[in-house]
Image (cartoon, rainbow, N blue to C red):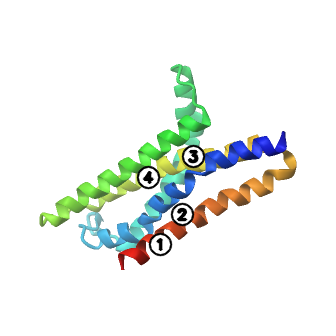
Amino acid sequence: EGLAAAGRVLVVFAFIPLFWAMWDQNLAEWVLQAQKLDLTLFSGVVALPSQVQLANPVFLVSFLPLFTYGIYPLCEKLGLKLTPLRKIGAGLIFTGLSFVIIAQIQDSIDLGGHPSIWKQIFGYMILACGEILVWVTCLEYAYTNSPKYMKSTMAAIGLLTVSLGNYLVALMNRSIS
């Protein structure tokens, strides 16, 4: 039974390196984009391009209780059965949507515009929702579906998906350059 459970977890984890490869773009490409934005947060308060990344962890920490105690129970009340695979699928959609937002910002920049940083912060907000739906669900799924003696191994495999995503980005960057 332990190996069957581990196999199910590994099948779910098979797609997660692609998520991390996409997610990694906010660490570099989004910061480069932020250099071309109007970085005014409020009257007289201007952010540095690298400071904008702070939005992601702030949204993560803020939204975890919102999802756990608000959104998930509300969906269940409305009759939407939230299986781990559905949460992960929704998270991948949110992640893709965040990239649509970033692409629209880039289109505006390419046309000579100087969009507000708030548009990119909105992209970070959507990305954080995707991260909660994908990564937190994967960790929970691995922990609850693996036998006691394999919980640490499954957590390590989960972290391996992050490494594999980073490796995919490195391969892409190498082929581009």
The residues bearing labels 2 and 1 have C-alpha atoms spaced at a distance of 10 Å
Q: Amino acid at mark 1?
A: Leu
Count neighbours of disc 2 (C-alpha within 10 A) and say few if under 14, some if 14 to 19, many if 20 or more: many
The residues bearing labels 3 and 4 have C-alpha atoms spaced at a distance of 13 Å
- Which mark lies nearer to you, 3 or 2? 2
Q: Does dot 4 land on a helix, a strand or a loop?
A: helix
Circle 3/circle 2 CB separation < 8 Å:
no
Q: Nearer the viewer, residue 154 or 66?
A: 154
Which of the labelled discs sits on residue 165, or is there none? 2
Lower position in the chain sequence, tag 2 or tag 1: 2
Count neighbours of disc 4 (C-alpha within 10 A) and say few if under 14, some if 14 to 19, many if 20 or more: many
The residues bearing labels 3 and 2 have C-alpha atoms spaced at a distance of 23 Å
Is residue 49 toward the left or the right of residue 110 in the image? right
Lower position in the chain sequence, tag 1 or tag 4: 4
- Which mark lies nearer to you, 2 or 4? 2
Q: Does dot 1 land on a helix, a strand or a loop?
A: helix
Q: Nearer the viewer, residue 143 or 12?
A: 12
Q: Nearer the viewer, residue 161 or 28?
A: 161
Q: Does dot 3 land on a helix, a strand or a loop?
A: helix
Q: Which residue is mark 1?
A: 171
Q: What residue is at 55 percent from the left and 51 percent from the top?
A: 15
Q: Where residue 138 sits: x, y (%)?
A: 63, 47
Q: In this rendering, is residue 118 above or below 67?
A: below
Which of the labelled discs sits on residue 24, or is there none? none
Please identify the residue farthest to the right as the structure is shown.
149
Lower position in the chain sequence, tag 3 or tag 2: 3
Circle 1/circle 4 CB separation < 8 Å:
no
Lower position in the chain sequence, tag 2 or tag 4: 4
- Which mark lies nearer to you, 1 or 4? 1
Which of the labelled discs sits on residue 127, or is there none? 4
